[in-house]
Image: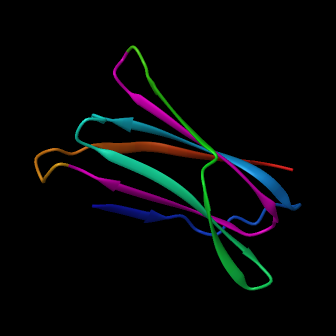
Amino acid sequence: TLLHASTLWHPAAAVASAKVIAEVDGFDEAVHDLDCVLKSTVGGVETTIAAASVATEVRADGLVVRTWRFTFPASTTLRRVLTGLTAGATSTFRVKSVTDIATV
């Protein structure tokens, strides 16, 4: 089981959409799961934001690139939470990198 919560992001201005891009090595959609939500804090209240869309691309080198797109009420405090599952201890994958892009 994978659970990774990022540190809080504090954009310079309130943002209402974001994109999270993960490069994943050894990922097999038949036996693995990888999901992402955002946590937005407004007025001291944290809200979970599900992705509006998810796209998965398999590059020629076998690396999987998964992109989650989010829209939400304007926020100046966000946190990314990745969760994942495998079919067992011998069926692993590795998140090589994660890029967060927020837009006004």
Q: Locate residue 69: give its quadrant.
A: top right
Q: Quadrant of the N terminus?
A: bottom left
**Which residue: 71% across, 49% down?**
18
Find residue 14 and report its image quarter: bottom right
Residue at 23 percent across and 50 percent down: it is 86
Span highlighted in magenta in the image? 61-86
Rendering coords of residue 71 (x, y %): 74, 51
Question: Magenta span: helix, strand or loop, mainly?
Answer: strand
Looking at this view, name the residue that lies furthest to the left. 90
Q: Is residue 78 magenta?
A: yes
Q: Position of residue 21 (x, y in %)?
A: 56, 40
Determine whether 32 is above or below 55 in the image: below
The x and y percentages for residue 49 are 63, 62
**Going 87% across and 50% down the picture, which residue do you hit?**
104
Query: Which coloring applies here?
Result: rainbow
Find the residue positioned furthest to the bottom.
44
| Number of disc labels | 0
The question of residue 60 being in magenta is answered with no
Give the image quarter of residue 76.
Answer: bottom right
Left or right: 76 in relation to 5 = right
Residue 97 shown left or right of residue 11 in the figure: left
Viewer-side residue, 33 vs 82: 33
State left or right for residue 79 relative to residue 26.
Answer: right
